[in-house]
Image (cartoon, grey):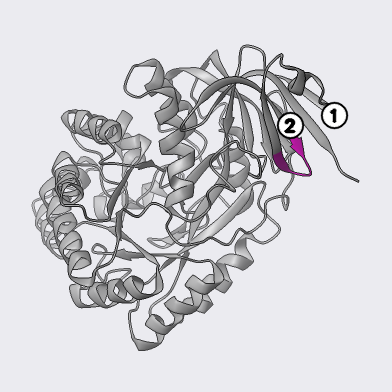
């Protein structure tokens, strides 16, 4: 039995176009668009009609950086694949790319199998995986080739967290050389973790234990230095590079310089760096611990460089790095020692709304909103045009978005499994009304109508964004 849905009278916004058009969906895919009121559009019949008068019709968001159920610092991220993907849907995101983790001494395959088991049958929206490579050796390098063939086409390495995820320059170079051959994309957490550990030790010895010192020891210069080093290693290897969660203006400058030289170097930032700052880290009574993440929040003056980078395409993607830990019982593990606060913020539900607020505030255009939140992440990680756009043949991952609705972000109303909101009390204009995932309603007029297990694992092709 085929099923047809028509979305009528909305303003369809993609990365390239804005058009008042109707959208015809059949069997989970977009089959046609036609200008509203034309004979072609008027001729369509369907079992379901959605009236989008006065609303935007946009592609479902693609969040290319989430950590559901991530083990960290003796605890686990508080969102499961079930709760986290449900919250993502509430926020207008219809695809996440999470990170499977290789443990030192184990194979990539074991890590990938473990994460597949966590997610299988649990997700409300579609999902894919990157692979965290913690142990570079000859066997791991061979496995990278196999994973690329299977549709796991990106590999994350860390210049931070010695003793946990850390790779030295030699290991990074070997992995980059391999990705240059097999078409994979190396994603880099660029902070000089060896130097940061020295500064942490010195700060604690001085009795500087509050959350704000997390930001002070993880210096912007050490993010910039690691970004520069990662770029040069990628250049030596002849490999593309994607720098995750860029937070500092000095790191943006390194990426911009590399791109001006014609290198395949890409940068991602996150809403927390665009909307929050070290002022939050300095909140009294240990409240600052809620804002501990790495890279850390920076002083407000860095935000202008991040917005500029998004406008000039020196930064291409906004993801969330969603990695929530509850204040009670998890963030509190670091009372008296900021280095023991689990690193991560909740945000998978907030990204699309915050970026729409950026449109309202004049930081970016409507099409750029869709580009950095939907189209480019899909292209960067081999999901386009199946995901990230509204066009014939694309999955019908579509959001009906009310650009005039006002909301106040709060733990009282969000759906993430965490006991605080990083944006508590923030007023934003714009709200998700209805969300389709492969044509099925997951959110219907602000009611959850989805189910665990609707979301399917989605293999990816290689990066479609190379110069």
* Local SS, label 1: loop
The residue closer to the viewer here, 281 or 114, is 114
- Number of marks in the rendered image: 2
Q: Which residue is mark 2?
A: 24
Q: Position of residue 40 (x, y in %)?
A: 75, 23
Residue on which the image places disc 1: 46
Q: Position of residue 412 (x, y in %)?
A: 55, 26
- Position of 333 with respect to 454 (left or right) is left
Q: Position of residue 303 (x, y in %)?
A: 23, 30
Quarter location, residue 464: bottom left
**Residue for point 43% across, 73% down:** 102
Residue at 48% in and 27% down:
353
Front-lying residue, 29 or 457: 29
Residue projecting furthest to the right: 1
Determine the secondary structure under disc 2.
Answer: strand
- The stretch in magenta equals 24-30
**CB-based contact (under 8 Å), mark 2 and mark 1:** yes
27 magenta-colored: yes
Residue 294: mark in rendering: none
The residue under the point 40% across, 47% down is 321
User: Crowding at label 1, few (<14), some or many (≥20) Cα neighbours within 10 Å?
Assistant: few
* Prevailing secondary structure of the magenta residues: strand
Pick whichever, 449 or 436, lies toward us. Answer: 436
């Amino acid at each position: 039995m085929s099923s047809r849905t028509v979305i009528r009278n909305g303003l369809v916004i993609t990365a390239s176009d804005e058009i008042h058009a109707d959208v015809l969906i059949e069997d989970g895919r977009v089959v046609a668009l036609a200008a509203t009121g034309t004979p072609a559009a008027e001729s369509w019949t369907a079992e379901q009609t959605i009236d989008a008068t006065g609303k935007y019709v946009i592609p479902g968001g693609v969040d290319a950086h989430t950590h559901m159920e991530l083990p960290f610092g003796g605890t686990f991220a508080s969102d499961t694949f079930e709760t986290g993907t449900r919250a993502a849907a509430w926020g207008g995101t219809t695809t996440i790319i999470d990170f499977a983790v290789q443990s030192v001494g184990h194979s990539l395959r074991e890590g990938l199998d473990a994460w597949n088991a966590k997610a299988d049958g649990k997700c409300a929206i579609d999902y894919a995986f990157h692979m965290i490579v913690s142990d570079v050796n000859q066997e791991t390098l061979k496995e990278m080739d196999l994973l690329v063939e299977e549709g796991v086409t990106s590999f994350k390495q860390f210049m931070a967290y010695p003793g946990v995820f850390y790779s030295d320059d030699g290991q990074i170079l070997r992995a980059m050389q391999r990705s240059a051959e097999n078409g994979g994309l190396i994603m880099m957490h660029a902070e000089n973790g060896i130097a940061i550990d020295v500064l942490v030790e010195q700060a604690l010895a001085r009795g500087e234990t509050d959350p704000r010192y997390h930001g002070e020891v993880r210096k912007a210069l050490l993010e910039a230095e690691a970004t520069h080093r990662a770029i040069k290693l990628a250049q030596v290897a002849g490999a593309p590079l994607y720098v995750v969660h860029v937070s500092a203006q000095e790191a943006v400058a390194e990426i911009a310089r590399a791109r001006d030289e014609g290198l395949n170097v890409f940068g991602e930032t996150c809403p927390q760096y665009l909307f929050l700052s070290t002022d939050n880290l300095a909140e009294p009574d240990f409240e600052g611990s809620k804002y501990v993440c790495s890279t850390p929040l920076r002083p407000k003056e860095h935000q202008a460089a991040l917005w500029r980078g998004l406008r000039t395409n020196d930064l291409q993607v906004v993801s969330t790095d969603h990695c929530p830990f509850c204040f009670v019982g998890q963030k509190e593990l670091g009372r008296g020692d900021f280095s023991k606060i689990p690193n991560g913020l909740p945000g998978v539900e907030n990204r699309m709304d915050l970026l729409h607020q950026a449109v309202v505030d004049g930081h970016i255009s409507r099409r750029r909103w869709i580009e950095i939140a939907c189209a480019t992440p899909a292209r960067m990680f081999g999901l386009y045009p199946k995901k990230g756009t509204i066009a014939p043949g694309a999955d019908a991952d579509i959001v009906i978005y009310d650009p005039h609705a006002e909301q106040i972000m709060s733990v009282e109303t969000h759906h993430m499994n965490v006991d605080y909101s990083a944006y508590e009390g923030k007023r934003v204009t714009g709200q998700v009304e209805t969300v389709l995932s492969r044509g099925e309603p997951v959110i219907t007029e602000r009611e959850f109508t989805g189910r665990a297990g609707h979301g399917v694992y989605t293999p990816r092709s290689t990066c479609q964004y190379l110069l």
